[in-house]
Image (cartoon, rainbow, N blue to C red):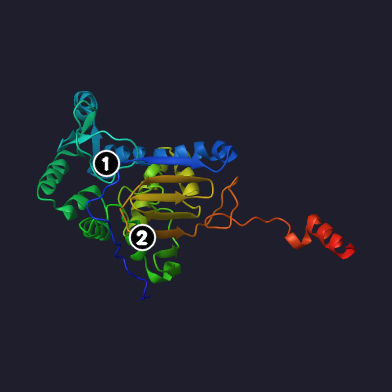
Amino acid sequence: MSEFNDEHMDLIPDMDMPPFARMAWVSNEAKEAWEPVLRLASEFYDIMESLSVYSGVRDVMTTSLYPEELVVKTREDFAENNIHFAPIAEVGDYEGFAHYHPPVEEGKPWHYYGPLGRPEAVNQFVLADAVQDHEKMGELLGFPKCCTTFFQREWTKGYNDPIWQIAMNTPEENVLLRDKNFIRLKAYPEVLSLLRYNGPRFTFHIPCSTTCEASKKVAEKWVAVARKYGYHEQVDALYEVLSWPVEWNVLHGIAEVKTPVFKIVTNSVYSKEKYTVQIEGSRYPEYAATGLAFPFRKPSGVKITESKSFERAERDIKVD
């Protein structure tokens, strides 16, 4: 193992960044071309969360419902499909991306959080949640055991956004470049979770590495179901955006996620130092920005020594 293969991240204690997520495009052309694709890619998660349970592919999922939604769902949708929902927590409303359930604030909207699915599976989930048996909850949700074990281990250490830990847990043969607090990796698009802050991802869980084979198999199962029900556009869009090169970095509770066409700024772990994870990617989008730093392509213009202005300057010098 390399001397840099250290999953430990030094955190600032008792600090927490409130949920938020902001996105900026590199140009109007990029936004016009790729915003509809990104929207389709983001739809996959919500579609599959519900479809996986209602189609019987898995027995339970977790979700949040406003009180008024619960009444309607119980009376109509749940009763018709023999689907139950068990509210196990009251959760505050928030904007952006949250790594935890914010508390209810007086006078502000809130919702119920809990398992939804087949009655027996819902009951088992409620019992597992009561004793914080994450292994059992992960099993009921259809998560690979390796990923459930990994997430539980890292969460208890305070890594509620364990992107660096995922990178450090990726097999060495998939590491392209490594230095202190920096790593560049290969990744399966089906397993990549770096864009989940604004939606796009294939899996409902946090994978234990960027090349987790068990997670790839789970994602391929969801893809097969999605295509069976006609969601080809969403699947194709997701493969597109998750095949681009991407960089994630974090410092002092703020993460930046950069692709060639947009950037996301969001809340993350409160690290004392900057940590950077880069994913190689296999496609490059049209209208991408150029730049000297990853994930941008370097400008392909004329060398300065071959430019007309350089020739003029050189000629003037000789004349003088």
Does residue 107 appear left or right of residue 287 in this picture? Answer: left
Q: Quadrant of residue 265?
A: top left
Q: Position of residue 299 (x, y in %)?
A: 65, 55
Q: Position of residue 305 (x, y in %)?
A: 76, 63
Q: Nearer the viewer, residue 228 or 65?
A: 65
What's the residue at 31%, 53% (across, down)?
269
* Most foreground residue, 91 or 283: 91
Left or right of residue 255: residue 108: left
Mark 2 residue type: Glu
Question: Mark 2: few, some, or many residues within 10 Å (few <14, many ≥20)?
Answer: few
7 and 54: which is toward the camera? 7
The residue beneath circle 1 is: 56
Give residue 38's mark.
none
Number of other residues with Cα within 10 Å of mark 1, as a class: few under 14, some 14 to 19, many 20 or more: few
Position of the N terminus, as image quadrant, is bottom left
Left or right of residue 29, residue 238 in this image: left
Q: CA distance from mark 2 to mark 1?
A: 45 Å
What residue appears at the point 29 percent right and 65 percent down from the top-left corner? 8
Q: Residue furthest right?
A: 319
What percent of the width, then of the height, locates residue 26? 55, 43
Residue at 40% across / 38% down in the picture? 43
Q: Nearer the viewer, mark 2 or mark 1?
A: 2
Label 1's element?
Answer: loop
Is 48 above or below relative to 268?
A: above
Secondary structure at numbered mark 2: loop
**What residue appears at the point 54 percent right and 54 percent down from the top-left corner?**
283
Q: Earlier in the sequence, mark 2 or mark 1?
A: 1
Q: Position of residue 250 (x, y in %)?
A: 38, 54
Write down the quadrant of residue 165 in the picture. bottom left
The residue singled out by tag 2 in the image is: 273
Q: Is residue 232 visible in this depiction of the protein? A: no
